[in-house]
Image: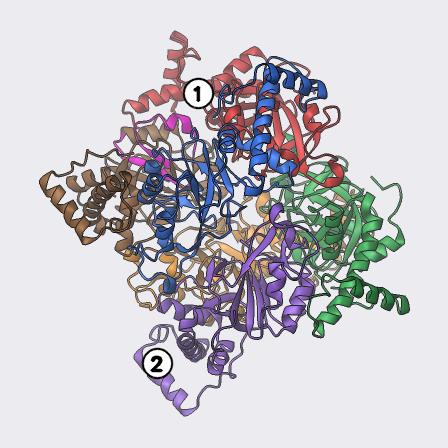
Chain colours: A blue, B purple, C orange, D green, E red, F brown
Amino acid sequence: MPSAEPLAAATREALLHTSTASISTELVLRGLPNTFMTGVAPLRPGVRMVGEAFTLRYLPARADMDERRIDFDNRTNVQRLAVEAVGPGQVLVIDARRDLEAASLGHILATRIQARGAAGIVTDGALRDSPAIAELDMPTFSGGPHALISTLRHHPIDMGLPIACGGVLVVPGDIVVGDGEGVIVIPRSHVDEVARAALRREQLEAFITEKIATGASIVGIYPPTQDVMDEFEAAEAQAPRSINDQDWT
Amino acid sequence: MPSAEPLAAATREALLHTSTASISTELVLRGLPNTFMTGVAPLRPGVRMVGEAFTLRYLPARADMDERRIDFDNRTNVQRLAVEAVGPGQVLVIDARRDLEAASLGHILATRIQARGAAGIVTDGALRDSPAIAELDMPTFSGGPHALISTLRHHPIDMGLPIACGGVLVVPGDIVVGDGEGVIVIPRSHVDEVARAALRREQLEAFITEKIATGASIVGIYPPTQDVMDEFEAAEAQAPRSINDQDWT
Amino acid sequence: MPSAEPLAAATREALLHTSTASISTELVLRGLPNTFMTGVAPLRPGVRMVGEAFTLRYLPARADMDERRIDFDNRTNVQRLAVEAVGPGQVLVIDARRDLEAASLGHILATRIQARGAAGIVTDGALRDSPAIAELDMPTFSGGPHALISTLRHHPIDMGLPIACGGVLVVPGDIVVGDGEGVIVIPRSHVDEVARAALRREQLEAFITEKIATGASIVGIYPPTQDVMDEFEAAEAQAPRSINDQDWT
Amino acid sequence: MPSAEPLAAATREALLHTSTASISTELVLRGLPNTFMTGVAPLRPGVRMVGEAFTLRYLPARADMDERRIDFDNRTNVQRLAVEAVGPGQVLVIDARRDLEAASLGHILATRIQARGAAGIVTDGALRDSPAIAELDMPTFSGGPHALISTLRHHPIDMGLPIACGGVLVVPGDIVVGDGEGVIVIPRSHVDEVARAALRREQLEAFITEKIATGASIVGIYPPTQDVMDEFEAAEAQAPRSINDQDWT
Amino acid sequence: MPSAEPLAAATREALLHTSTASISTELVLRGLPNTFMTGVAPLRPGVRMVGEAFTLRYLPARADMDERRIDFDNRTNVQRLAVEAVGPGQVLVIDARRDLEAASLGHILATRIQARGAAGIVTDGALRDSPAIAELDMPTFSGGPHALISTLRHHPIDMGLPIACGGVLVVPGDIVVGDGEGVIVIPRSHVDEVARAALRREQLEAFITEKIATGASIVGIYPPTQDVMDEFEAAEAQAPRSINDQDWT
Amino acid sequence: MPSAEPLAAATREALLHTSTASISTELVLRGLPNTFMTGVAPLRPGVRMVGEAFTLRYLPARADMDERRIDFDNRTNVQRLAVEAVGPGQVLVIDARRDLEAASLGHILATRIQARGAAGIVTDGALRDSPAIAELDMPTFSGGPHALISTLRHHPIDMGLPIACGGVLVVPGDIVVGDGEGVIVIPRSHVDEVARAALRREQLEAFITEKIATGASIVGIYPPTQDVMDEFEAAEAQAPRSINDQDWT
C-alpha cells in the first residue's frame, strides 16, 4: 500500500509547521468540513505528526473468526501483517469503532512500528501499556487507555481499505497530521495546495495575533481588510517570516 | 455475492419458528456470545425474518468522495449497486456506524429491495420514510427514524465485505434472523446445527413453560433434570409438537 | 423478606387509580424528588402495577464467581433463589446497572414469577423473550430487549438489600407503582399518606381538566384558587367522584 | 408573537400531505441540511402537524430564580404565560436541553394549549402524564416520558426567542411540520416554495414507487431520467393526482 | 451589560483564595445545589479565575441565518460583537449546548479577550487552537478541543441573556469562579456572603486537615464539634491565618 | 473486614513492578477477561498502587434515608464508618454508579484515609478538592472531578459487600492494582500465581521489546518462539533481571 509518489518535502515541511486548526479552515474553504477526528487525543501533546495513512480495520470479535485468543500467527493475523507492512512516513490509522472497553494495540507492536520508521499511530479505540507508549519518540493518538488485549473485543479484518476513525473518513494515502489539538485528515489530491495555504494562514494569523496581543481591536483586522493583507504581504516581502519563528505547540 | 448453496429448507423452516433468544443460547453454547445486535429494533415486530447477509458498508461523507449530493448515478453509486444486487432470500445489512443523525436508506429503495425478493433490511443507522417502510410486507430493522437523506453523513464505500452492525460482526453469507426482539447473526458454518438445536430448545422451553405456567416450581424443571428431559422426549415421540403449535411472536 | 404487614386495601386501591405523575408530585411535596425511574418503560403500557419491592442485585460477571455459564443450580444461584422467593403482591426489582447488552431475565422465569402471584417485574437492564413476556398478564418494565442470557454480563449477588434501579433508590418493602409512563417508588413510611393525597390530586386534576378542556383559562384555576378548591370540595361532597369514573391509562 | 401574515391555505394543505422526508430533501436542495430534529418522537404517530413555531426556552433550575417550586403564579411564570399566549395555528416548541430526567410539560397545560387552538406541542425534553397526552386530538412530540414536574430541573426563562430543539435551530414564526417520522422546521422565508416543491416531490415519488413496486429497476427511474419526468408530467396533466389519493401516514 | 457596581475587593480577594469545593458547599447550605459545571475543565489547572459573567448564546447553525460561513462582519456577527464588548473583570461564558464536534472559539479571539482585560473564558463546547490558548495568561475552561471553526455547527444568536453552561444556569452579572477542579457560578445576590463564608470554611478545613494529617480521627473533628470550633476561633483570634498561608491549587 | 492473611511480600513486590496490562493478560489466560476498570483514571499517573479491596457502596440519595444533608454523624454514616475502618494495605473502592454529577469523596476524608495507612482510593464517581487530593502521597483514581458534596446524589448504604466499580466486579479482599493506565482487580484466589506470571511476562516483554526496539521483526519473536523463550531463560539464568532494572511508569 505504498503511495505512488512520496509527499513533497515542501509540503511535509509546511504541515510540520501548521496547526490542525489552520489546516481545518483551509479544508472547510474547499468544501471539506468533516476531517478533524472527535475524541482522539495525543499521548504526547508536544510532538507533531505528518504522514500518509496506512489503514487497519477492526470488527467486533466473533469466535469462529478468531481461532486462538492470546497467541497470534504473524503470517495470518491481519493486525500483525499490518504492523510488518507499515513503512517509513506512514501513519497506522485503526478503525476500532470508538470502542474503549479493550485495547486496539499495545507497547511492543508500537515499538515495532516506530522501528519500521512509521510517522505515528492513530486509533479511535484504546491503547494498552499507554504509559510506555507515551514515552516513545513516535507520536500516538487514541481514544483512551485500556489494559485488556484487543482480541477480546476486536477482530482485525483487513488493511488498505477506506475506514472511519474518530468520525472521519480515512482513505489509504490520505495525509494525516497531528498536533496538541488532535488529528486531521487531508485528501491526497488536496494536500499540496492545502499545506501551502494553511502555512500562509498560520503566518497571517501570527501577524494578526501580534497586533491583537498588543491592543488592536479585531474590527478591521480579523478578518483582515485589504489594508491588513497588503501590510502583511509587504512585511513578508521585506523579511519573510521563517516557519521556525513561531512557537509551535 | 450469492452464496454457493441456498439455505436448507428444513433449516429455514426451523429458524422461522425459533426465537432469537433460543438461537442466542445455542450460539453461546458453541462459544459465540456476541451475535445479537444492540439498539436495532423491528419496524414491524410481528413479522419474522430469515435470510442470508448481503453487506453494505458506509463511511463518514467527505466531499471529495461524493461528487453530487442529491442525485445518484445508478451505475457507480455503491448504495444503488447494492440495491440492484441484493437478491431473493438475502438480507441487506448496512453498517452505518450507529449514526442516527441522518437516514441510511429510504422508502423507494426499500420498495425496490422488496420487489427483488429480498428477505429484509437491517441497519444500525436510521431509516427515512419510516412510516411507509413499516407498511411493507418485508421485515425491516433499524436504529431509529431520521428524515435526512443519507449522503449528508454517509458515503457508501463497498459491499460484500465483513462489517459491524449493532455491535456485531456480520460476514456476507451469514444467516440473519429477526423477530420482535431484534436481530441475530448465525455464522454459515453453524447454521444447520444451531437451527436444529434452537428449534429443539424452543420446543423444550414450551414444554417447560406449560409446566411452570400451571404452577410447577423451577426447581428440578428449569434447567430440566434428566427426568424432565425423558418426559419431554417421550411426549415428543408420542405426539410430535408441530412447529406451528406455538404462538410465535 | 415478606413485609411485616400487607399494604392496606384502601391504599392499594388508591394507587391502582392514580398516575405515577400524581404520585411523583405528592412525593416532591414531601421532600422526595428522586423516585421516578429514568429509562425504564412498560412492555404493556395499559396494565397498571402496584406491589412491594423485592430486590435483586446483579454485578458484572467474573469467571471465578460463576462456575457454570448456562445451567444453573436452583439451590445456590441467587437469581433462581429470588424467583422462588418472590411472593404474592411483590414486585421483583432488579438492579442491572442499566446494562443493555445482555438480558437480566427471560420468559420462563417471568412465567414462574407470575405463577407465584407476584405483582410485576422491573429491571433497568434488558429482558429476553421480550415479545413473549409482553403477553403475560403480569406487568413488566425494562430498559429494552436483548436476546443474550444474563450470565454473560451479570452475576446475581444478593437479594433483599437496598439497590439502585433506573437511577432511583429502592429499599425492600418500598411500594412500587407502574403505569404507561413508567415506574415510581414510594417509601413504605409514606405510602398511605401519599396514596390518599395522590388520589385526591388525581381527582382534583380531573375536575380542573374538565374546566380547562371546555375552555377555561389556567389563570385562577391551575393552580387552583381557594374558590376552585371550595367548588371541588362541594362537588365531591354532593356526588363523590368514583375512582372508576376516570379513564386510566 | 403572532406572525404578521397567516400561512397560505395552499401551503398548509400541501404540508399536511407531504412527509417530513420529502420536505427535508427540498430543504437540503436549498442549502438547509440541519432541520429535522433528532430524538424527538410522536406520541400519536398517525396524526400530522403543521403550525407556526411559538418558542419557549428552559434553563437549568436554580433556587434563587424559582421562588416556589410546586405552585405557580400564572401572572409571572414564563411557562404559564406561554401557555396562555400560544394561539391558533401555532406549535409550542420547548428547548429543554434534551434533559430527560424531569418533565417539561404535563397533561393539564397540554389540554389548555389544545383548547386555545394550538396546532401542537414539541419538546426535546420529557412529557409527564404522557399516556393522557397521547389521547389528545392535538399532536405532540417529545424526547420521552417522565413523571417528575418540570420545576425540579427546568427554569422557564423566556418565550419568543430563537431556540435549539432536538439539535435544530427554531426561530419564532418558522413553520413546524410533524408526522410519524418526527419533526422538521422550515424557515418562514422558504415555506411556500418548499411546500410546493415537497408536494410535487411526494407525488413524483409516489409515481416512481408504483413503478418500482411493480418490478421496475431503479436504473433510469430513481433518480428519474427526463423520460420519466415527461411521463410523470403527462400523467399529471391528464389526471392530476389528488393530494388525497395517497395513503399518508 | 456592565454590572451596576463592581465586585467588592474583599470579596474578589476571598474568592481568589477559596476552592470551588468550599464555595459549592456554602451555596448548597443556601439552597443552591446546581452551580458547579459538569464536563468543563481548565486548560491551565494552576490558574485561578474570578469574574462577572458576560454571556453569549449559540444555537445550531442554519444556512438562512448565516450568510457567509468563514468570514465575519465584525459589525453584525454576535460572536464578534461579544468579543469587543466583554470588559475588564468579566468572564465570557458561552452556551454551546455541550456540542464537542466543532469549536466555539479560537486563539485570535481569545487573545483579543485577554487584551480587553477579561478575567477568563468558559465554554461547554470546544476550543480550537487549544494548545495556543493554553499558553495565554488568562484562564480558560472548555468541554474539549476541536479544530473545526464554530460556524459549521454554531450560530451566535445573542449576548447578555441567561444561558445554560455545563448543565448550570448562568445569569449575566453572576460571579464565575474557576480553579483546577472546574467552574462554579455564584448568584450576584449571594456573592459577598458566600465568599466570606467559603473563605472561613476553607480556613477551618485547613485547620481540620492539619489535625487529620497528623493522625487525628475524623470523629469529633470532622464535622467539627463546638470544642473544635472554639479552638479554631481562638487560634484565629491569636494569629489570624493569612489567606496566603495556604497552598492554593 | 481485614483479610485473614496479609498479601505475601513477594506477591506485593511483584505487583508493584508489573503493569496492569501484563496482569490483565495473565487474568485473561485464566478465564478472567473483565477485570480492568473503564473510565477510572489516576490523579497521579506516576504513583503505583497495590492493596486489598475494602468496598463501599453508594445508592441514589433519597430524603427519607438521609436525615441531614451537610453534617454527618460519624457514628452512623456509612461513609464515615468506612473511612474509620479502612486500614493499612487496603484500598477503599467506591461503587458510585459512574455518576459524575456530584463528588463521592473529598480532601479531608482522603487525608484521613492516607493517615490510616491505606494503600489508595478508587471510585467510579467523582472526587472533590481533586487538586488537593492529587497532591497526597497516596494514589487515587476516579471518574473525574466535581465540587458538589456527595450527599446530594449519593446515599452510602453499606461496606464490605461485593460491588461494581468501573464496570468490574470487586469482592472485599480482592487485590487492586493501579498504575498510569488505570485500575485492575485480581481475585484473591489467583493473586500469587497471577503476580508471579505477570512479573515473568513483564520481564519477557522487556526482553522482547529490547530486540524489537533495536530492529527485529515481530515474526518469530512476538509471540516468542521456543528459541526466543530458551534465549530468555538462559539470559535470566545467567544474569537475573532485577525487577528494578526496568523503567516503571
Which secondary structure lies at badge 1?
Answer: helix
Of the pair B211 and F226, the residue shown nearer to us:
F226
Lateral position of residue D19 relative to residue E198, left or right: right
Q: How crowded is mark 2: few (under 14 residues within 10 Å), some or many (20 or more)?
A: some
- Label 1: which residue? E202
Quarter location, residue C203:
bottom right
Amino acid at dot 2: Val
Give coordinates of residue A38: x percent, y percent: 52, 41
Q: In this view, does D137 lie above or below B196?
A: above
Q: Residues within 10 Å of mark 1 (few under 14, many from 20)?
A: many
Q: In this view, does B233 lie above or below A204?
A: below
Q: Residue B228 carries which label?
A: 2
- Taking the magenta stretch, the answer to whether it contains residue F126 is yes
Of the pair C23 and B242, the residue shown nearer to us:
B242
1 and 2 marks in contact (CB < 8 Å): no
Using the rendered image of the protein, determine whether residue E81 is visible from the camera's viewpoint.
yes
- Residue at the bottom extreme? B238
The quadrant the C terminus of chain D occupies is: bottom right
Identify which residue is drawn at 38% across, 33% down. Answer: F73
Region rendered in magenta: F116-141
Which secondary structure lies at badge 2?
Answer: helix
Give coordinates of residue B19: x percent, y percent: 49, 72
